[in-house]
Amino acid sequence: MNAEPVITQNAHLRGVFAGFVRTLLGKRRMRLHRAGDELLLKVPKELRHVLEARLTKGQEVVVWGEEEIEKRSHETVFTVSKVQTAGFDTGTPAAFLVSPIHVCSKKNCWRSGGRELDSALRQALDQRGLAGLVEVREVDCLDHCKHAPNCEWSGHVFSRCSPRDATWIVEQVAAGMRAK
């Protein structure tokens, strides 16, 4: 039987990035030093790859996400959805690091308008001023082939998309970034 979360709440934490480690169960977690404590935070794989490439140990960060209390173990799990680096007190520009938008590039999606969707998403991000914050990445398959073309952001799958939907999808991404 799977443990289901009982309580979920949005939260943010401030601390010093200390890299990634594997737990005893082999799960990758982000280490965050905060007020003498070390926290292990769950990070979705696509965001983890962005963070591994752009963060350095010792860098001060603010992380946003959801805190859940597991029903079975009563353990608190914090899942990161967005990270802000430097500049949050000094007024200097800050960098937000968020999950990329994945566009399926398999033959069925690509031929059904995926290529045009990819281009329209990049253009919509640029128009919305999010081009530097959110990447668009072509991925092999999102496993929704019958509903092509498809894209995904932070666990949300958008199916049967056309280039006309790109602005709406980017607005959903922006709203998700603000909410967390």
Image (spheres, rainbow, N blue to C red):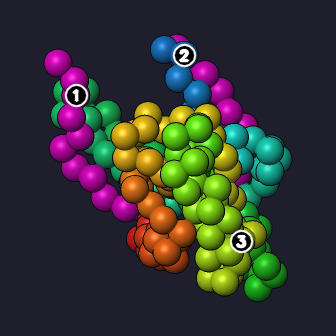
Disc 3 element:
loop
- Crowd tier of the residue under label 2, counting other residues whose Cα lies within 10 Å: few below 14, some 14–19, many 20 or above: few
Q: Is residue 77 visible?
A: no
Q: CA distance from mark 1 to mark 3?
A: 37 Å
Residue 94 on the magenta segment = no
> In the structure shown, which secondary structural element does the residue marked by tag 1 occupy?
loop
In the visual, does 128 lie left or right of 4? right
Q: Give me the C-alpha separation between circle 2 and circle 1.
A: 18 Å
Q: Is residue 146 visible?
A: yes
Identify which amino acid the numbered label 3 is placed on: Ala
For the residues labelled 3 and 2, the Cα–Cα distance comes to 34 Å
Q: Can you say which quadrant of the picture contains the N terminus? A: top left
Residue at 65%, 27% in the rendered image = 21
Outermost residue to the front: 111
Residue 71 vertical position relative to residue 56 in the rendered view, above or below: above
Residues at badges 3 and 2 in contact (C-beta under 8 Å)?
A: no
For residue 40, what is the image quadrant? top right
Amino acid type, callout 2? Gly
Between 143 and 149, the residue placed more toward the observer is: 149
Left or right: residue 168 versus residue 131 is left
Residue at image mark 3:
131
Q: Position of residue 54 (x, y in %)?
A: 80, 51
Task: Say which residue appears at 31% left-offset and 58% top-offset.
Answer: 9
Q: Which residue is mark 1?
A: 3
Which kind of residue does numbered mark 1 sit on?
Ala
Say which quarter of the image contains residue 61.
Answer: bottom right
- Residues in magenta? 1-24
Quarter assignment of residue 22 = top right
Which tag, 1 or 3, sits closer to the chain's start?
A: 1
Residue 34: x and y in percent read 60, 51
> Height in image: 156 above or below 23?
below
